[in-house]
């Protein structure tokens, strides 16, 4: 029941601000809405050491009063191995999905905003049955020009989490995040996205470093490194998981 409630809260943040913006503007300019799909091969280390498949959908929506960002990604892999009886066994070695949504309400200076954020993560091979976050606070663009941009978000929130052994480790947190983008050329872009959620039970941090090169008008090749770190995990579980991926990204619009 708690999981269903949290997913509902994430959906509310993802769609309520869009609905309000559309009511004010009637029809949103399609150029202000983007949707990217990503699929590729990934090599992981840490709690999940395997070669896997990964998929992602990410979207941004710029409205007169709102700037919204949504993302959902999944990781799944099945491996075959030979048991002691020389029989082939199929087992799942990676099963994870993560979703997030952030709605930024623009103030008189549109570079300054108030944000609401929600995320949910279910990683079968981590120390947690699930991890979810609700947070809100201040978001600002430090700069945004033709070459690069940098924005950040800071504010309090609450982490809902349960270990794989059923222990509730939810707590009040402070969330900080940054998003840096650098256009190296007309076809190449570097991105560095980081976040940390500091709580009394656990500090959860995530970093994604990527370099993408446009192949044609809609297709790009992307190389990325994702780091996921939890400060407090069960014995026998590593604190840091890494994902190194080469993926194809298709821009729908």
Image (spheres, grey):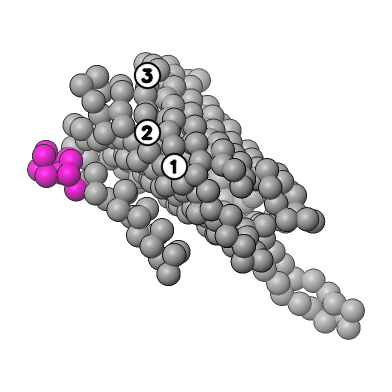
The mark lying in front, picked from 2 and 3, is 2
Q: Is the magenta stretch mostly helix, strand or loop?
A: helix
- Local SS, label 1: strand
| Residue linked to disc 3 | 144
Going from N to C along the chain, the mark reached first, 2 or 3, is 2
Note whether 45 is above or below 89 in the view shown. above
Counting the numbered discs, the total is: 3
In the rendered image, residue 175, in percent from the top left (x then y), is placed at 49, 36
Identify the residue at horizontal 79%, vertical 71% (top origin): 81
- Local SS, label 2: strand
The foreground one among 138 and 214 is 138
Which quadrant would residue 76 be assigned to in this image?
A: bottom right
Note whether 220 is above or below 128 in the view shown. above
Going from N to C along the chain, the mark reached first, 1 or 3, is 3
In the rendered image, residue 113, in percent from the top left (x then y), is placed at 30, 28
- Residue 38 seen from this side: no
Tag 2 and tag 1, C-beta contact below 8 Å: yes
Q: Give the range drawn in magenta.
A: 19-28
Q: Rounded to the nearest whole Å, what is the CA distance between mark 2 and mark 1? A: 9 Å
Note whether 24 is above or below 84 in the view shown. above
Q: Which mark is residue 157?
A: 1
Q: Dividing the image into 4 quarters, which one contains the C terminus?
A: top left
In the rendered image, residue 198, in percent from the top left (x then y), is placed at 56, 38
Is 20 magenta? The answer is yes
């Amino acid at each position: 029941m708690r999981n269903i409630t949290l997913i509902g809260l994430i959906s509310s943040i993802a769609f309520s601000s869009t609905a309000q913006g559309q009511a004010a503007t009637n029809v949103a300019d399609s150029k202000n809405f983007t949707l990217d799909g990503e699929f590729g091969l990934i090599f992981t280390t840490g709690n999940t050491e395997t070669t896997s498949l990964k998929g992602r959908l990410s979207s941004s929506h710029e409205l007169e009063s709102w700037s919204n960002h949504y993302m959902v990604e999944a990781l799944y892999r099945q491996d075959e191995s030979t048991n002691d009886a020389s029989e082939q066994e199929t087992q799942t070695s990676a099963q994870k999905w993560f979703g997030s949504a952030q709605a930024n309400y623009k103030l008189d200076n549109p570079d300054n905003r108030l944000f609401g954020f929600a995320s949910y993560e279910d990683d079968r091979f981590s120390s947690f049955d699930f991890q979810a976050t609700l947070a809100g606070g201040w978001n600002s663009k430090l700069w945004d020009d033709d070459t690069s941009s940098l924005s950040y978000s800071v504010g309090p929130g609450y982490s809902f989490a349960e270990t794989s052994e059923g222990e509730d480790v939810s707590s009040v947190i402070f969330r900080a995040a940054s998003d840096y983008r650098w256009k190296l050329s007309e076809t190449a872009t570097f991105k560095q996205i980081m976040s940390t959620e500091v709580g009394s039970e656990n500090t959860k941090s995530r970093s994604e470093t990527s370099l993408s090169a446009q192949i044609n008008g809609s297709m790009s090749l992307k190389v990325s490194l994702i780091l996921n770190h939890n400060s407090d995990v069960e014995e026998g579980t590593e604190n840091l998981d890494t994902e190194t991926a080469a993926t194809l990204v298709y821009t729908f619009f």
